[in-house]
Amino acid sequence: MVVGAVALTGSQSAAAAAPEQPLAGRVLTYDASASAEFHDAVDDGAAVWNSSVTNVQLRPAQAGETPNIRIVADDGWPRAVTTSLGNGTVYMGREAADYNWVRIASHELGHILGLPDMKPGPCSSLMSGSSAGTACNNVYPDAYEKAWVEDNFAGGFAPSKAWERPLVFQD
């Protein structure tokens, strides 16, 4: 069941693309203007995903552009609220002061890209989140997490029934 339409980047459309040509990766934009002291960590977290997957890329929204993702700093625990696959709000909660902020940003962006928490889990799993402990500095998704995101954004947009309602991932 298709919940929404996707605007493809470039001049190709799904109907016009030849079967042998892969569709260009989807570009999701984010607005980190309310991320306060976490702005660099958010940019680094987006760069992690951009270097890890090809079917979707994260870019800062341009002036006047409506972003897919809002990034907000607050005093709570880090969390993501998804409105649909690739859309939602990431809260960079200051309560996680003992953790690696780039790991937190990468992890929360992972939720926006369709990944659930995978707790408990080892440090090698980005989506293990806080269960990997404060000493964990791995900011990269593992092969399974990369493949899941690639599948989520491969050749079209047909999210699961889970995307029919907003999801909140409280880490």
Image (cartoon, grey):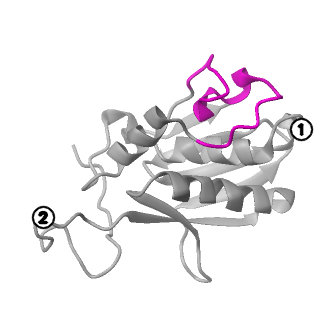
Residue 20 is labelled as: 2
User: Which percent across, then down, holds residue 56?
Assistant: 43, 58
Q: Is residue 131 magenta?
A: yes
Q: Which residues are magenta?
A: 118-140
* Rendering quarter of residue 76: top right
SS state under label 2: loop
User: Which percent across, then down, holds residue 45?
Assistant: 66, 53
Tell me which secondary structure the magenta stretch mostly adopts.
loop
Please report whichever mark, 1 or 2, sits nearer to the chain's N-terminal start: 2
Q: Quadrant of the N terminus?
A: top left
Viewer-proximal residue among 64 and 100? 100
User: Which percent across, then down, holds residue 70?
Assistant: 63, 59
SS state under label 1: loop
Count of numbered circles in the view = 2
Q: Specify the amino acid type for callout 2.
A: Glu
Q: Is residue 31 left or right of residue 111?
A: right
Q: Is residue 121 magenta?
A: yes
Question: Is 72 drawn above or below residue 25 in the view shown?
Answer: above
Q: Residue at x 31, y 37 (%)?
A: 160
Question: Is 100 drawn above or below residue 54 in the view shown?
Answer: above
Question: Label 2: few (<14), some or many (≥20) within 10 Å?
Answer: few
Q: Is residue 81 left or right of residue 74?
A: left
Q: Specify the amino acid type for callout 1.
A: Ala
Residue 97 is labelled as: 1
Question: Is 18 drawn above or below residue 71 in the view shown?
Answer: below
Viewer-proximal residue among 148 and 137? 137
Q: Residue at x 54, y 41 (%)?
A: 111
- Judge depth for marks 1 and 2 and give the one in front: 2
Q: Residue at x 67, y 30 (%)?
A: 129
Q: Quadrant of the C terminus?
A: top right
User: Which percent across, then down, holds residue 51?
Assistant: 54, 57
Mark 1 → mark 2, Cα distance in angstroms: 48 Å
